[in-house]
Amino acid sequence: MSQTAAHEEPELIQLLTPEGEFKEHPDYPLEISAEEIRALYRDLVLVRRVDSEAVSLQRQGELGLWASLLGQEAAQIGSGRALRPDDMAFPSYREHGVAWCRGIEPKELLGMFRGVTNGGWDPHEYGFHLYTIVIGSQALHATGYAMGVQRDGAVGEDGTAVISYFGDGATSQGDTNEAFNFASVNNAPVVFFCQNNQWAISEPLERQARVPIYRRAAGFGFPGVRVDGNDVLACLAVTRAALDNARTGQGPTLIEAFTYRMGAHTTNDDPTRYRDAAELDEWKAKDPIMRVRNHLELYELADEAFFTRIDEEADKVGEMVRTQCRSMADPEPLEIFHEVYAEPNVHIDRQRSEFADYLASFEGAGAEGGR
């Protein structure tokens, strides 16, 4: 590829303009009912409310940390709703929208960030793996899982596909690139879903890549596509096609969802220190929720009563999130040693005993629970 070609403006798959107009795409046809679009709008609004409540709870000292998805709702809901029940998703730590689509209650996420659980949910029950803090490692986990699916013969039109979520910063990690290579040479049924939100904490995209991220796939021998990450319909259509290709033996795909992190990287971050307000204002005009609302209003697919009902439901969800978070009980201190290994382990037993003695050394502290 020439230097000129490398800097050509890439195609952006878009089905829904910021003004709400629907545009068909020849490669990604989407048959969707008004009811389904209204359901996607509900997902977007409720997930954003969960997110905003969690940010507020962290500011109030109820959570230790929170990684906001503000601005990335369409990428997560669109791709999440493309998954089938038997598919498996491997998230990073910001995929609250995908978790919502997989049936995980917000309290499960809050418990982890509050520090009252020693793990989380059952990945196999929900088809959604545990959150991953080590940047990029989930891409390898997903690839290994996909290779296992392949070798177990759980593929075909009704088979299992795997998806891995990560950000633009993770594409600079060795684990992610190794996953690309393993997936390619094994033709593994995995989709790599990069939410390119323009910033790897305070590092801008131009410091991460000289070419659009989706073009990296070509170097590993599989297709890549860039989708408008603020367009929930495009994210749904593109991800659904990639998952279908994966499960039917056509190998991996890299999807670059071109979006924007409208909030901080986490609640420990201050984005005003490294990016301009004008950039944020530009992306606010592309808000993924307003885009769907514009569409529903433009095509007269929903009335004002519908939007009022969703807002009222969001208020109830917000209240539920606050109540559940504040009512979570702290775990017994020695529970951290439970289920570290499937079988009894002398080293864990020794550590548990030593920690029980340590707790007992404080006035009023007992060693109960040292089982």
Image (cartoon, grey):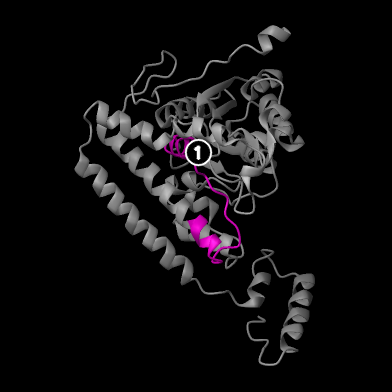
The answer to whether 300 appears left or right of 124 in the picture is left
**Residue, x 62% and y 38% (percent of image)?**
166
Q: Is residue 106 above or below residue 7?
A: below
Residue 58 location, quadrant: bottom right
**Residue, x 49% and y 35% (percent of image)?**
75
Residue 363 location, quadrant: bottom right
Q: Residues within 10 Å of mark 1 (few under 14, many from 20)?
A: many
Q: Position of residue 271 (x, y in %)?
A: 62, 44
> Which of these two is toward me, 294 or 134?
294
> Which of these two is toward me, 212 or 100?
212
The answer to whether 62 appears left or right of 135 in the picture is left
> Which of these two is toward me, 60 or 140?
60
Kindly identify which residue carries mark 1: 72
Type of the residue with mark 1? Gln
Q: Position of residue 159 (x, y in %)?
A: 48, 34
**Residue, x 73% and y 9% (percent of image)?**
3
The answer to whether 42 appears left or right of 228 in the picture is left
**Residue, x 41% and y 13% (percent of image)?**
26
Q: Position of residue 52 (x, y in %)?
A: 46, 52
Farthest residue toward the bottom?
363
| Residue 354 is one of the magenta-drawn residues | no
Q: Is residue 305 above or below residue 343?
A: above
Q: Secondary structure at mark 1?
A: loop
Residue extent of the magenta highlight: 54-82
- Figure quadrant of the N terminus: top right
| Residue 70 is one of the magenta-drawn residues | yes
Q: Is residue 307 above or below residue 346?
A: above
Q: Is residue 211 visible?
A: yes
Q: Is residue 1 visible?
A: no
The answer to whether 110 appears left or right of 361 in the picture is left
- Figure quadrant of the C terminus: bottom right
> Which of these two is toward me, 121 or 94?
94
